[in-house]
Amino acid sequence: MFAFFSKLLAKITAVVQWFADLGKQVFKDLWEIATDVPCWIFDKLLDVVVSAISSLDLSGLQQYGGAWGSLPSEILNILGLLGVGQAVAIITAAITIRLILQLIPFTRLGS
């Protein structure tokens, strides 16, 4: 009779332990989902940005790329030594960032 109750208690303990392990695993899985959702949203947002940038037509800017090649080599050398290419890249990046920030609401405080 005592062996029956000990086996019954062992089975009940095993079932309770199984439900406890199930609850822990469900919590861990929900935590993984909750931490992956912001990353997924950010990834999809970047996909939208990439598709928006790839849909821009920048073919009109290609005509200005050949303008540097028509300059004499001495002038190109001096411009390279002065760092005009890097300066133009920095200025272009700053203007682009400023234009992008203008698209975000509540960031128009400085302009």
Image (cartoon, rainbow, N blue to C red):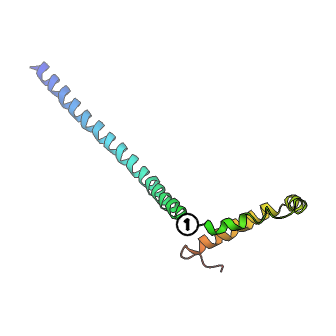
**Image-based side of 14 in relation to 42, left or right:** left
Q: Residue 17: horizontal and vertical position, in percent?
A: 26, 33
Residue 15 against residue 76 in the figure, above or below: above
Q: Residue sitting at 67 percent across and 65 percent down?
A: 62
Residue 31 against residue 15 in the figure, above or below: below
Q: Residue 36: horizontal and vertical position, in percent?
A: 43, 50
Say which quarter of the image contains residue 101. bottom right
Per the image, label 1 sits on a secondary structure element best described as loop
Return the residue at label 1. 56
Depth check, front residue: 56 or 13: 56
Q: Residue furthest front?
A: 70
Q: Residue sitting at 60 percent across and 70 percent down?
A: 100
Say which quarter of the image contains residue 63. bottom right
Rendered-image quadrant of the C terminus: bottom right
- Residue type at mark 1 is Leu
Q: Residue sitting at 28 percent across and 38 percent down?
A: 22
Residue 22 against residue 77 in the figure, above or below: above
Rendered-image quadrant of the N terminus: top left
Depth check, front residue: 22 or 13: 22
Q: Residue furthest left?
A: 1
Q: Residue sitting at 11 percent across and 21 percent down?
A: 4
Label 1 environment density (alpha carbons within 10 Å; few <14, some 14–19, many ≥20): few
**Image-based side of 64 in relation to 27, left or right:** right
Q: Residue 95: horizontal and vertical position, in percent?
A: 68, 71
Say which quarter of the image contains residue 79. bottom right
Depth check, front residue: 39 or 21: 39
- Total marks in image: 1
**Image-based side of 78 in relation to 44, left or right:** right
